[in-house]
Amino acid sequence: PQLISASIKLELDSGAADATLSKGLSWMRRAMYLTRYTTSNVKMTAKRLLSGIPGTYRDGDEMKSHVYACLALDRGRSNGAAASPMVQQPFLQTLLARLATQDGSRHVLEMLHSLRAHLVA
């Protein structure tokens, strides 16, 4: 089993803490239940994530941690290994290649909808 977490940072307004909390919960609801996945915004997100990977490769200390995680942890069961740029880069490139075809896009969107259904069930 894998772990998923989400967080939102809120700056509390001293006079309206309840309103701030309500706004944060509204954002979480919108993200979890109301977001519509489209091929274009999944592509945009994948490209944005992919563009950040070269910076990670240039950070020696961070890369040391990623290499250690990949060597020491089970890649199929560990979030630490799965989050490594050495795993993420090929995954994102494959994802973008799938999104380039109509059948691939349909499959990716179906998988995202299925994941959301499992998360909010």
Image (cartoon, rainbow, N blue to C red):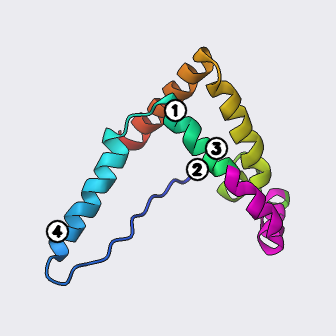
* Mark identifier at residue 62: none
From mark 2 to mark 4, how far is it between C-alphas? 33 Å
Which residue is the site of mark 4? 19
Q: Give the range drawn in magenta.
A: 51-70
Which residue is the site of mark 3? 47
x, y percent for residue 76: 72, 45
Mark 1 vs 3: CB contact within 8 A: no
Which residue is the site of mark 2? 2
From mark 3 to mark 4, how far is it between C-alphas? 35 Å
x, y percent for residue 105: 57, 23
In the rendered structure, which amino acid carries the disc numbered 4? Answer: Ala
The residue located at (42%, 43%) in the rendering is: 119
Q: Is mark 1 on a helix, strand or loop?
A: helix
In the rendered structure, which amino acid carries the disc numbered 1? Answer: Ser
x, y percent for residue 98: 66, 25
Q: In screen coordinates, is 25 left or right of 18?
A: right
**Magenta run includes residue 66:** yes
In the rendered structure, which amino acid carries the disc numbered 2? Answer: Gln
Which residue is the site of mark 1? 40
Q: Nearer the viewer, mark 2 or mark 3?
A: 3
